[in-house]
Image (tube, helix red, strand yellow):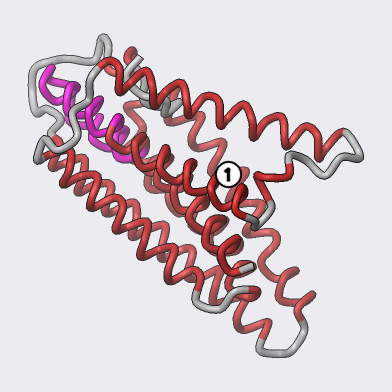
Amino acid sequence: MRTNNPVLRDKTFQGLFADGERMTMNGTVAKTGLLLVLSMVSAYWTWNRFDTALAGGQVETAIASITPFLWGGLLVGFALAMVTVFKKSWAGVTAPLYAIAEGFALGGISAFFEMRYHGIVFQAVGLTFGVLAVMLVAYRAGWIRVTDKFRMGVVGATGAIMLLYLVDIGLRAFTSMPGIGFIHESGVLGIGFSLLVVGLAALNLVLDFDMIDQATAQGAPKYMEWYGAFALMVTLVWLYMEILRLLSKARR
């Protein structure tokens, strides 16, 4: 098992190697950059819509103005992600559409956080790009070596975190319990937990780079650059949300 990213597994590239133009790491990174730009453009549109409505002085109106785009972005993004996973050759179309849909959702979520904690989104975006750059440089320079023990440790820890989140969602949705306290609280334990999750998300980027690097070495077709970029976007969205959560806890 190379990575805990659900769209980037060992079997992702099996049976896809052929003659012709092939996948490269630089090409994948460039396409990841394009997807990030697309998501930021759509996120800004939702953000601007929220700000315009909020300028009228009605918070409820501002929230209502972006709610369809927030939920629509989440649902459409999920549907496009499923299509991309099962139809990898369509990634050149579905990955950009996924980035746009996720941008609508992230723009709405970010607007809510910004309304409560001024300046938090700028910090979260800057930290997300910073972590991406640092992890890419560290991986390419060989400062972080992806060994079997490294993979097993990151995958196991990430799986445990995902299970914990599922339990928390279940408790909040189907019982009267408020969920698992330290996931949401802003005390030392809560902030420490968020720091751990941010670190795991960053390490998952390294695993994704390693998987893509191995695919390029084996000669995956060119369109898989889009799929690799899409997979990195999944991890980056998770990283951004966890950084936003961490910063909000620190502000509280």
Tell me, yes or no, whether the highlighted magenta stretch contains residue 91: no
Looking at the image, the residue that sits furthest to the bottom is 56
The residue segment tinted magenta is 207-230
Tell me, yes or no, whether the highlighted magenta stretch contains residue 221: yes
* Residue type indicated by callout 1: Val
Regarding mark 1 in the picture, which secondary structure is present there?
A: helix
Q: Residue at x 50, y 77 (%)?
A: 119
Q: Quadrant of residue 63?
A: bottom right
Image coords of residue 86 (percent x, y): 44, 22
Quadrant location of the C terminus in the rendered image: bottom right
Magenta stretch: dominant SS?
A: helix
Q: Quadrant of residue 70?
A: bottom right
Image coords of residue 184 (percent x, y): 68, 50
Q: Residue at x 17, y 43 (%)?
A: 138
Figure label count: 1
Indicate whether 73 appears above or below 139. below
Looking at the image, the residue that sits furthest to the top is 15
User: Where is mark 1, residue-wise?
Assistant: 76
Image coords of residue 194 (percent x, y): 53, 48
Q: Quadrant of residue 85?
A: top left
Q: Depth check: 202 or 90 in front?
A: 202
Left or right of 173 in this view: 152? left
Q: Depth check: 50 or 146 in front?
A: 146
Q: Is residue 52 visible?
A: yes
Quadrant location of the N terminus in the rendered image: top left
Image coords of residue 206 (percent x, y): 27, 35
Q: Residue at x 60, y 60 (%)?
A: 249
